[in-house]
């Protein structure tokens, strides 16, 4: 059981990084956190994946005053997503014609939703950015939607000012990632420990399973809606 869940976790994280790299390759706009990562990368000369790893580690430090507990998936997210993103950018050339870029955008968002369902459904903890969101929600009493919107507007604005790409892809991602991730979460969420099947009904999904980072998915579970990932 643990081997299957670990495989699901790391497959999801690798695919999440790959989908983020494909979004960069479209040149049509990124999700808010990657707009910020790209902007910092342009200013520092680092790769966008390296920036993602460093920002993830910095955000994870903010969990300490919020009394959030990271899981294996949280720590792995910091390292694996950025590394996979850089590997994808190295391996995949930018498509030229606009129709190909639009197709790549659609494929990247769909892949990101599947990756979100895989790694969150494994039940090893949320990404650092989602944990920041849920931690602030619990400490401030503000709604998840308000906290999430505030964080993402701030990082999007900062990333845009630094030169990150904001465009139609940013809008498509914002509109499509929630529904896509919800569908895949239903497929990939592990059963709750000790869940009892009654009358042939399927065992309930784990209510403690966290929602996604970039981009917490809408609450298909008891956890707040989300990135991703992330």
Image (cartoon, grey):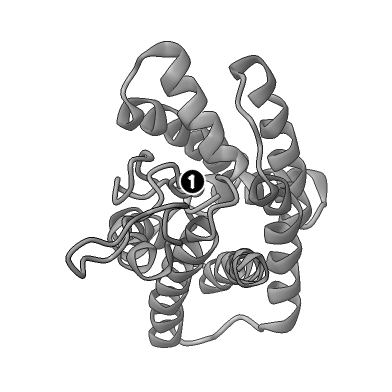
As drawn, 135 above or below 228 = above
As drawn, 77 above or below 69 = below
Q: Nearer the viewer, residue 132 or 121?
A: 121
Residue at image coords 44%, 42%: 208
In the rendered structure, the answer to whether residue 95 lies left or right of residue 44 reads: left
Q: Nearer the viewer, residue 197 or 22?
A: 197
Q: Position of residue 174 (x, y in %)?
A: 34, 53
Q: Position of residue 194 (x, y in %)?
A: 43, 52
Instruction: From the image, tell me which residue sits under label 1.
Output: 32
As drawn, 56 above or below 30 = above
Residue at image coords 60%, 68%: 1
Seen as rendered, the residue at the extreme left is 199
Q: Is residue 41 visible?
A: no
Residue at image coords 21%, 66%: 201
Determine crowd level at label 1: few under 14, some 14-19, many 20+ residues with C-alpha closer than 10 A.
many
In the rendered structure, the answer to whether residue 221 lies left or right of residue 122 reads: left
Residue at image coords 43%, 46%: 211
Q: Position of residue 87 (x, y in %)?
A: 75, 73
In the rendered structure, the answer to whether residue 157 lies left or right of residue 180 reads: right
Q: Position of residue 152 (x, y in %)?
A: 45, 36
Number of marks in the rendered image: 1
Element carrying mark 1: helix
Query: Quadrant location of residue 162?
Result: top right
Q: Is residue 1 visible?
A: yes
């Amino acid at each position: 059981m643990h081997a299957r869940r670990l495989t699901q976790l790391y497959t999801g994280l690798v695919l999440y990084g790959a989908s983020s790299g494909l979004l960069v390759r479209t040149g049509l706009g990124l999700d808010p956190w990657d707009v910020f990562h790209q902007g910092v990368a342009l200013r520092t000369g680092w790769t966008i994946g390296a920036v993602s790893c460093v920002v993830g580690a910095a955000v994870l430090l903010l969990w300490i005053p919020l009394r959030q507990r990271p899981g294996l998936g949280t720590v792995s997210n910091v390292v694996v997503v950025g590394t996979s993103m850089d590997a994808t950018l190295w391996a995949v050339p930018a498509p030229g014609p606009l129709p190909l870029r639009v197709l790549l955008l659609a494929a990247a968002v769909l892949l990101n939703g599947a990756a979100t369902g895989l790694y969150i459904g494994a039940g090893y903890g949320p990404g650092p950015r989602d944990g920041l969101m849920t931690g602030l929600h619990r400490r401030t009493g503000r709604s998840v939607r308000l906290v999430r919107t505030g964080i993402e507007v701030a990082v999007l604005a900062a990333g845009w000012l630094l030169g990150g790409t904001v465009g139609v892809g940013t809008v498509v991602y914002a509109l499509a990632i929630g529904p896509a991730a919800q569908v895949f979460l239903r497929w990939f969420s592990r059963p709750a420990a000790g869940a009892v099947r009654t009358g042939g009904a399927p065992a309930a999904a784990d209510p403690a399973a966290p929602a996604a980072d970039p981009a917490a998915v809408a609450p298909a579970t008891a956890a707040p809606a989300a990135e991703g990932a992330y």
